[in-house]
Image (cartoon, rainbow, N blue to C red):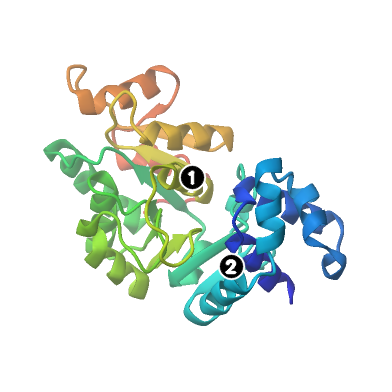
Amino acid sequence: MNLNQFLLRLHLTPGIGLKGEYLVAQWLTNHPGQLRNLLPSEISEIASVLPQHRQKFEQSFMSDKVSQALARHEKESQYLTFFDAQYPALLKESWLPPVVLFYQGNLELLNAQRLLSVVGSRKRSAYSETVLNRLMPTLIENQLVIVSGLAAGVDSLSHQLALRNHGHTIGVIGTGLNLSYPASSQKLQQYMAQHELVLSEYPLDAVGKKYHFIERNRLIAGLSQATLVVQAQEKSGSLITTSLALQNNRDVMAIPGRIDDPLSCGCNQLIQAGAKAVLTAQDILDEYPSLKTK
C-alpha cells in the first residue's frame, strides 16, 4: 500500500473525521518512511479518534468493505492527496485542508495564478445578474479563474457568466462527484466536469448533508487569494465562507446594496466590518498585485 492508497483508505474509513485525517497527514510529514509500521491502533492515537468511534475505526480500517470501496474509487475516480505535487499551495496553507480531493476535469486550473471565489445568495436576483454581468468580462479578460460552489443563485450564475465570457471556472461541491445538488445544477456540473474542473472531498454516492456544505465552504475560501460576496442575507452561509477566508488571511470583498434589501444586509455588514466595497472590476483587480490590467 503506497502513500496515496493509505490516505484514500483512511479517508474512506468511518470514524476518523476530516480533522483526524489531517493530523495523520501532519504526522506523516514529520515522520517520513514510517507509513509501513503504522497499526490501526496507532493511527487512532495520532488522529485523536474519539473513544466512542475508536473501535469502529480500528475494525473498519483493513476491512473488506473499506477495501472494496478503495478498489472502486481507484478504478472510477481521480484524486489528489495532500502530498501530491499538484495539490494547490494556497489550499495547503488554509485551515484544515482536505487530505484527499476528488476531481473531474482540467486539473491545470489549480495552477492558475489568480483565483477568485465568488459566493452569495441562493436566490438569483436582477441585482446579482446586473452586478456579475458588469464585473465578469473584465475579470475574465484579466485571466481570473472563478471558484464557486455550483449552488443555485449566485454560485451557478458566476460559473455560467465565466463560461459565457470564455473564461475558466472551478466548482466545489458537497456531494460525491457522481451526484449533483441541487438538481438544477446537474447539466452545468456535467459540462464543467468535462471542460473545466469540479472538486469534492466526498466519496462516490455521498449525498449532500447540511454539514457537507459548511465543510465545502472552507475549500472555496482556501483555494483563492480573495473572496467576493455578491449578495447575502444577515445569516447567510456565504458569511461562513468569508469568515474562513479571513481566518486564512485572504482578502474579502463585498458588493454594497440597498439598506432595505434583505439580500444585501450581509454584504453591507461585511463592508461596515472592514471588507472592501466593490464598485468596479478594478476594485477586485487591485487585490492581485502582480496583475497587469489590460
Q: Residue at x 65, y 51 (%)?
A: 16
Task: List the residue tagged with mark 2.
Answer: 80
- Mark 2 vs mark 1, foreground winner is 1
The type of residue carrying mark 2 is Leu
Q: What is the spatial separation of the Cα atoms under label 2 and label 1, in whole angstroms?
A: 18 Å
Of the 4 image quadrants, the one containing the N terminus is bottom right
Q: Quadrant of residue 122?
A: top left
Q: Quadrant of residue 265?
A: top left
Dot 1: within a 10 Å radius of its alpha carbon, few (fewer than 14), some, or many (20 or more) residues?
some
Q: Could you tell whether 147 is left or right of 52 in the image?
A: left
| Residue 204 in sight in this render | yes
Q: Could you tell whether 116 is left or right of 183 in the image?
A: right
Q: Front-most of 269 and 226?
A: 269
Q: Residue at x 57, y 79 (%)?
A: 71
Q: Secondary structure at mark 2?
A: strand
Q: Which mark is residue 215?
A: 1
Q: Quadrant of residue 127?
A: top left
Residue 140, x across and y down, in percent: 33, 57
The type of residue carrying mark 1 is Glu
Residue 45, x across and y down, in percent: 80, 48
Residue 99, x across and y down, in percent: 63, 57
Q: Disc 2, disc 1: CB below 8 Å?
A: no
Q: Front-most of 119 and 41?
A: 41
Q: Residue at x 40, y 60 (%)?
A: 170
Residue 129 sits above or below residue 196 on the image:
above
Q: Secondary structure at mark 1?
A: helix
